[in-house]
Amino acid sequence: MIELWFVIIAFLWTGYFVLEGFDFGVGMLAPFVSRGAAEQRQALQTIGPVWDGNEVWLITAVGAMFAAFPAWYAGMFSSFYLPVALVLVGLIVRGVGLEWRGKVTNTFWCDAGIVAGSALPAFLWGAVFADMLFASGLAALLGGVFSLVVSVLHGAVFLALRTDGPLRRRARTAALAASGLAVPVGVLALSQVGGLGGAGGVGGAGGAGDMSGAGGMVVALGGAVALAAAVALIWRRREGWAFAATAGAIVLASVAVFMELAPMPLPGLTLAEAASGPYTLTMLSWIGLITLPFVLLYQGWTYWVFRKRVLVAA
């Protein structure tokens, strides 16, 4: 049960990073790739029906941590109280900006809030998980930059996939420009997480667990390859496959991180020590078995309904 719930929590965090990743990217890019109010509305409409649903993955992941691994939850959110609080501030500011933008005449502050509220969580989540692994300010900075630039790339590819006309062309150009930073930063960051950069990684402490095994190296290397593949695919105007590649890179990076955390999610704290009792985990398993399929089906249906490209309003 303990290992099962660790995998479930890793799955929920990974889903959050993939889905909110392109939300964050679109939020950061919309004012810069749009020319005029109509195109900016077009860009934001690509995430309009789904951004709030994507945030549910964060709520579910945190709730599952609280119920299944209370000691891990308490240690993580007390150790990183300030960055997590700033993440919540960013999400609130972004949500207010998205909701109010269509109700005011001067949208400057709403647009600024969307950009800042997208960039802040995108950077801080990468910094938090990197610091959990390596307990180093340099590692946290690298992890934050990696998360930020990959979100920009992911969002640019999503915009190219979901829009048409001039905005689609500019989004593709933005994706190619972002890849110039995302690929080298991604290779450097993933080499540290996967143990390819030498013992101890960026922080020099070896992280929370030993990822010298071939499995972790393959996962990290796969993430770097997926980022490079995304660049080639967007260059060939294969936006759908490029989006799958950026999503795959985020999935593989998350898998590498949680493989590293698996033995000891926090220094001096094993999974068994962090876990709830068998009865609690059993009850959680039944609740998850009943509710999770409905949540997945509902969100999948939402994406299917809003799958068409968003056209600029006349």
Image (cartoon, rainbow, N blue to C red):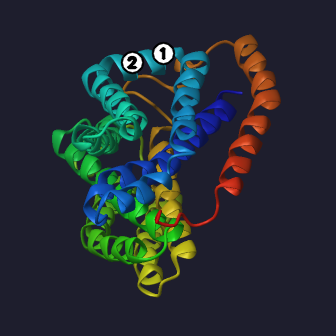
Q: Is residue 204 visible?
A: no
The N terminus appears in which quarter of the rendering?
top right
Name above or below for residue 159 compared with residue 55: below
**Pick the front one: 43 or 183:** 43
Whole-percent x, y for residue 162 in the image: 53, 66
Left-right relation of 24 to 311: left
Left-right relation of 134 to 303: left
Whole-percent x, y for residue 183 in the image: 32, 70
Which residue is found at the position 45% from the left and 62% from the top? 217
Task: Give how far apart the Cα atoms at labels 1 and 2 are.
Answer: 6 Å
**Pick the front one: 244 or 144:** 244
Instruction: Name the residue beneath numbered marker 1.
Output: 71
Instruction: Name the residue beneath numbered marker 2.
Output: 75
Name above or below for residue 129 compared with residue 47: above
Whole-percent x, y for residue 164 in the image: 48, 73
- Circle 2 crowding by C-alpha within 10 Å: few under 14, some 14–19, many from 20: some
Whole-percent x, y for residue 251 in the image: 52, 55
Q: How many marks?
A: 2
Which residue is found at the position 40% from the left and 27% from the top? 266
Q: Are marks 1 and 2 in contact (CB under 8 Å)?
A: yes
Which residue is found at the position 48% from the left and 84% from the top? 237
Name above or below for residue 266 compared with residue 257: above
